[in-house]
Image: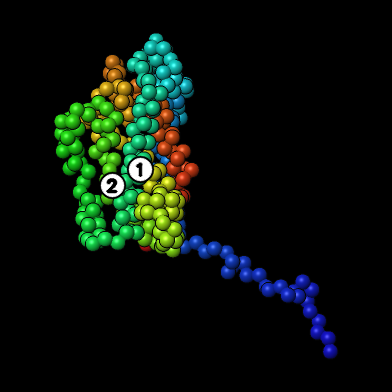
């Protein structure tokens, strides 16, 4: 007895276009509208900075709400980079003031790099003591450390300023770096959460081979925590790079002035009635570009590392 099969149906399930099609609901539409709105609010300021930086400063006053660059020119970037003469800067609506952006970039790199290195190293050592070493009172001391997270940073500015002034460290990199170089409650908590999940077998094997605590920390624990340390270093570097108020308190010398503070000085140096908004936005874009590139390159790693540490 033979069974006739319809051609094209052997071993193939019937297609269900309606089941496979993603259904759109009111909630999904609202969610997409919300996401697009947040994306627009986040990206639009960067576009407006670029639009202003590519405009002629005189022409901006005639069409302030134009969505496109007004009197397209690269003169603002030349002024920000110090490539235009004072006469050319004034002709395009600039103040004629010079902005030694390479010097300020150097100052910001020195300030952010040294402070980031100190914070990460000290925080890693403290996190190792709180997570891998056994000593009496470890948990109560760590709880006291966590209370520092509830203290607003603005409350420590005045005592730190008085201390730096008494030590004679104003207008120096040491005065900007020392107050925040040795302690960060969030960084200690962040690294401790990750170190708690590390296996102790490798450390025990190193101790059996005669390694001391410092050797175990630098040669065993640190390599295993390379990912969160890199993430923490990036976050700390970005925060330090964008720091403004503390350098404003302790520095007024151009030789140590960071880029964020130099932008404010550049804004106030305009002899005209209106500031050089085009030049200021060009300098702001140059200052923000390194941080934007860092976050684009390592943003996913930062988010994954923070989420992983938070689940510990």
Q: Position of residue 266 (x, y in %)?
A: 32, 22
Q: Is residue 102 visible?
A: yes
Query: In the depicted view, which residue is nearer to us: 160 or 288?
Result: 160
Query: In the depicted view, which residue is nearer to us: 151 or 74?
Result: 151
Within-10-Å neighbours for mark 2: few <14, some 14–19, many 20+: some
Q: Residue furthest front?
A: 210
Q: Describe the element under mark 2 as helix, strand or loop.
A: loop
Q: Position of residue 87 (x, y in %)?
A: 39, 10
Residue 21 vertical placement versus 14 (above, below): above
Q: Is residue 79 left or right of residue 147?
A: right
Residue 289 vertical placement versus 212 (above, below): above
Query: In the depicted view, which residue is nearer to us: 126 or 229?
Result: 126
Q: How many marks?
A: 2
Query: In the depicted view, which residue is nearer to us: 35 or 195?
Result: 195
In this figure, which residue is indicated by the disc labeled 1?
Answer: 236
- Could you tell which of marks 1 and 2 lies nearer the N-terminus? 2
Residues at badges 1 and 2 in contact (C-beta under 8 Å)?
yes
Q: Which corner quadrant of the image does residue 139 belong to?
A: bottom left
Between tags 1 and 2, which lies in front? 2
Q: Residue furthest top?
A: 87
In this figure, which residue is indicated by the disc labeled 2?
Answer: 184
Report the quarter where the N terminus lies: bottom right
Q: Residue at x 41, y 56 (%)?
A: 210
């Amino acid at each position: 007895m033979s069974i006739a099969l319809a051609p094209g149906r052997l071993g193939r399930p019937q297609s269900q276009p309606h089941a496979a099609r993603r259904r759109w609901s009111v909630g999904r539409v609202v969610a997409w509208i919300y996401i697009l709105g947040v994306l627009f609010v986040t990206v639009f300021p960067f576009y407006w900075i670029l639009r202003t930086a590519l405009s002629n400063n005189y022409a901006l006053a005639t069409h302030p709400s134009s969505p496109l660059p007004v009197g397209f020119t690269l003169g603002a970037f030349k002024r920000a980079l110090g490539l235009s003469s004072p006469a050319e800067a004034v002709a395009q609506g600039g103040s004629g003031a010079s902005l030694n952006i390479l010097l300020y970039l150097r100052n910001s790199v020195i300030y952010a790099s040294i402070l980031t290195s100190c914070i990460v190293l000290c925080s890693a050592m403290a996190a190792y003591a709180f997570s891998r070493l056994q000593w009496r009172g470890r948990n109560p001391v760590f709880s006291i450390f966590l209370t520092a997270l509830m203290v607003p940073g603005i409350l420590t500015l005045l005592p730190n300023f008085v201390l730096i002034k008494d030590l004679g460290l104003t207008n120096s990199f040491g005065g900007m770096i020392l107050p925040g170089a040795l302690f960060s409650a969030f960084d200690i908590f962040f690294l401790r959460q990750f170190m708690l999940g590390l296996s102790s077998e490798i450390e025990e094997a190193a101790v059996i081979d005669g390694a001391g605590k410092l050797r175990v920390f630098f040669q065993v624990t640190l390599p295993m925590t390379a990912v969160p340390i890199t993430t923490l270093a990036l976050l700390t570097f970005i925060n330090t790079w964008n720091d403004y108020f503390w350098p404003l308190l302790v520095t007024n010398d151009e030789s140590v002035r960071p880029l964020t503070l130099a932008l404010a000085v550049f804004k106030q140096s305009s002899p005209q009635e209106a500031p050089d908004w085009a030049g200021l936005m060009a300098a702001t874009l140059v200052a923000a570009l390194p941080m934007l590139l860092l976050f684009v390159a390592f943003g996913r790693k930062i988010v994954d590392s923070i989420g992983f540490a938070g689940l510990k």
